[in-house]
Image: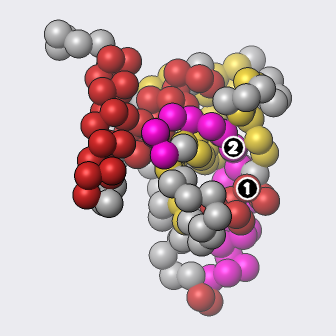
Amino acid sequence: MGVYSVDKLIAETRRIAKEYRLATGKTLPVTPEIAINDAISILGLLPSEEKNTGYDAIYEKDGERLRIQIKGRAIFDDKKGGYRIGQVKTEQEWDAIVLVIMNGDFLPEEIYIARRDVILNELEEKKKNNKKGAMTLAKFKLISELLWTEQNGFEQFEL
């Protein structure tokens, strides 16, 4: 085990990522790891022990087990549109995608969830123009459910 706790390391990563963006105008590729940490912590998920499985965490309740793929998106300019979420790997095993939306300080502001069937239906409709499984942030919000906000906490209590 390292000298520092994961929470302390994530806090420092947020600070460094923000400073780097201010200094260079570029973003460090740390958003996914911060999002995974935040979703697991806030939603009470279990981290996946297996690597390269297509999912990052597990939600277990009353015998139900959901494999959750976690994605993150930092929003630096609310007025700018066209933000996209990372590629959805449809061939991998997962049951739902949780999206953590962060502000320019890499702090979570909203968390959404969408089930696999809803996402696959949306991607299938757009397949002609979308070979890589990409989706806009706006579309993901439309087809998903809001789970948590920084302002109100849990918006619903079940995944």
Quick one: which residue is furthest to the front in this view?
23
Q: Which mark is residue 112?
A: 2
- Closer to the camera in the image, 154 or 59: 154
Depicted 124 relative to depicted 3: above or below: below
Residue 29 visible in the current orientation: no
- Residue marked by disc 1: 141
x, y percentage for residue 149?
71, 33
x, y percentage for residue 38?
50, 29
Which amino acid, mark 1? Lys
Quadrant of residue 49 within the rendered picture:
top left
Residue drawn at x 67%, y 54% is 116
- Closer to the camera in the image, 118 or 85: 85
Q: What is the quadrant of the N terminus in the image?
A: top left
Tag 1 near tag 2, CB within 8 Å: yes
Q: Which mark is residue 25?
A: none
- Closer to the camera in the image, 102 or 105: 105
Decide if residue 130 is on the left or right side of residue 56: right
* SS class, disc 2: strand
For the record, the magenta segment spans 104-127
Decide if residue 62 is on the left or right side of residue 74: right
- Closer to the camera in the image, 19 or 87: 19
